[in-house]
């Protein structure tokens, strides 16, 4: 892959047993967070207010370079900055292992369930999966980046969607979310599609857009901007995560190199993303602004063919993405059952249809909504996805050993390594600090700036640690906290 920083933010759903006094889902999420910081001592909890009104203690950075926090009552985890595709998959998966470990140690694994999904069938609540990609600032964002990416994102769900039973649509009216039926369907290939209301928008809280335009690079503003996406589903499949991020990164490589496919602008992107998700025929035909119709598979091939022409042979990861991108499109074109080992929605659809046939059920049976949710259960002994994995029905791209190692170790080739190194010293010596993605503030010293996410700052870290050796320790009261 090209040298690009990427990361994933995942919100987790939580359910507690109604007949047990285990506390609210929000309270359980806070207990898991606090256990990670104060009992397992896996990072430094925030000592300060952060942007967007996040209070002290709401979250913090982990020693693996990621960030764990509470957002709108949900436990959320952001991976560290990654520059290698399969590193990102590893760091995306490691949080599942940590949550299960904590629930085991506080003896709540029988009463509490965490889910890596995007919808709540019963309340209409949604949980986000946000992808982040570093972009060069000198590439015109509104004139080039957005128009090129929009058709790609609308159709990417055919291999990146997590699938769902039925569907509600959220409609924004006068600042309030209204919930209502938009035509009952049996199965959709995407969990997020029904909740997308516009193509682009800046503020996440008020409008779920395909592309978020907030310009918050968390790096050198003169060189970089951050592409922040709300459109993707949370994937259980390691393969789907790698393909989703890998194909997106290759399309960004093309854009930054000055290459674009022919004009594939859709007549209505928001409607198209819903239509593809709800298409029971799985033909996925969309209309372009030109009046031409094209299948989502063929539209994806337009990007694939250009990427293969320009980027093939560059490195092993690029060739993996190109090869698997082509393989998935070929298999989808023949029969969706060909991709049940790689694509979440296909695996889920196969499971549900097999169960429906055995039990004589229809798509509107509420039993299916429960099974839909259990696919995303992150406990390896209870989740349906992990049952498929145990039976050898899924294609993995990383190992359990790699995931276990990532709990306490940051990536070696990004600034996450430097941030973690300084954080460990601060933690061991009980020194007060303010930690952020691109800087660390100290009480009596100049802040440590990490504006280049590609740097590991070895020499700068040595200088910082030498200066910190003279800093006063926290008071005993602060240390007890």
Image (spheres, helix red, strand yellow):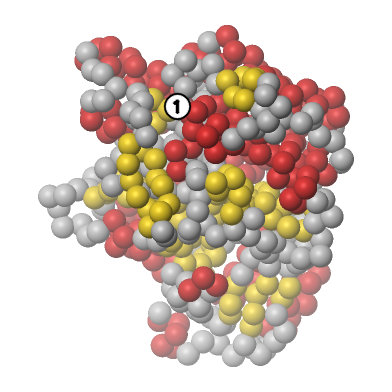
Q: Secondary structure at mark 1?
A: helix
Image coordinates for residue 439, horizontal then vertical, percent = 68, 72
Judge whether 280 appears above or below 91 on screen.
above
Point 87% across, 40% down: residue: 258
* Residue 406 in sight here: no
**Which residue is most to the front?**
291
Q: Quadrant of residue 322?
A: top right
- Give the quadrant of the C terminus: bottom left
Image coordinates for residue 372, horizontal then vertical, percent = 34, 31
Q: Quadrant of residue 331?
A: top right
Image coordinates for residue 238, horizontal then vertical, percent = 54, 34
Left or right of 138: which side holds 210?
Answer: left
Q: Residues within 10 Å of mark 1 (few under 14, many from 20)?
A: many
Image coordinates for residue 188, horizontal then vertical, percent = 43, 28
How many numbered marks, from 0 up?
A: 1
Report which residue position mark 1 lands on: 278
Point 48% across, 74% down: residue: 53
- Give the quadrant of the N terminus: top right
Q: Front-most of 34 and 212? A: 212
């Amino acid at each position: 892959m090209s040298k690009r920083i990427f990361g994933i933010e995942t919100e987790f759903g939580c359910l507690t047993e109604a007949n047990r006094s285990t506390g609210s889902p929000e309270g359980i999420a806070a207990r898991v967070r606090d256990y990670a910081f104060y009992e397992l001592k896996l990072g430094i909890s925030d000592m300060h207010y952060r942007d967007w009104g996040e209070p002290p203690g709401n979250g913090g950075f982990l020693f693996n370079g990621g960030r764990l926090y509470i957002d709108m009552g949900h436990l959320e985890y952001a991976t560290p900055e990654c520059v290698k595709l399969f590193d990102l998959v590893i760091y995306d998966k490691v949080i599942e292992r940590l949550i299960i470990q904590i629930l085991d140690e506080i003896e709540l694994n029988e009463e509490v369930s965490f889910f890596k999904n995007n919808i709540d069938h019963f309340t209409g609540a949604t949980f986000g999966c946000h992808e982040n990609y570093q972009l060069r600032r000198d590439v015109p964002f509104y004139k080039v980046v957005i128009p090129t990416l929009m058709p790609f994102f609308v159709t990417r769900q055919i291999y990146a969607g997590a699938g769902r039973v039925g569907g509600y649509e959220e409609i924004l009216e006068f600042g309030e979310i209204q919930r209502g039926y938009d035509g009952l369907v049996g199965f959709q290939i995407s969990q997020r599609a029904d909740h997308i209301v516009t193509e682009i928008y800046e503020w996440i809280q008020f409008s779920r857009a395909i592309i978020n335009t907030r310009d918050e690079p968390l790096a050198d503003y003169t060189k970089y901007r951050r592409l922040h996406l709300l459109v993707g589903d949370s994937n259980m499949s390691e393969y789907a995560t790698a393909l989703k991020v890998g194909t997106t990164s290759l399309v960004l490589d093309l854009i930054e190199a000055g290459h674009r496919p022919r004009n594939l602008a859709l007549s209505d992107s928001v409607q198209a993303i819903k239509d593809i998700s709800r298409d029971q025929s799985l033909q996925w035909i969309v209309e372009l602004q030109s009046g031409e119709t094209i299948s989502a598979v063929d539209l994806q091939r337009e990007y694939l063919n250009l990427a293969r022409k320009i980027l093939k042979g560059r490195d092993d990861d690029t060739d993996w993405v190109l090869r698997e991108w082509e393989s998935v499109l070929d298999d989808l074109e023949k029969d969706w059952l060909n991709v049940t080992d790689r694509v979440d929605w296909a695996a889920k659809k196969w499971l549900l249809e097999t169960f429906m046939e055995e039990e004589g059920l229809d798509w509107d049976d509420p039993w299916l909504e429960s099974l839909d949710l259990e696919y995303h259960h992150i406990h390896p002994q209870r989740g349906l996805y992990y049952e498929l994995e145990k039976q050898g029905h899924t294609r993995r791209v990383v190992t359990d050993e790699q995931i276990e190692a990532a709990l306490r170790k940051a990536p070696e080739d990004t600034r996450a390594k430097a941030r973690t190194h300084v954080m460990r010293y601060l933690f061991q010596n009980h020194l007060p600090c303010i930690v952020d993605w691109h800087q660390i503030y100290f009480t009596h010293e100049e802040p440590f700036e990490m504006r280049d996410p590609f740097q590991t700052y070895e020499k700068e870290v040595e200088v910082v640690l030498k200066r910190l050796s003279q800093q006063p320790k926290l008071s005993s009261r602060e240390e007890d906290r």
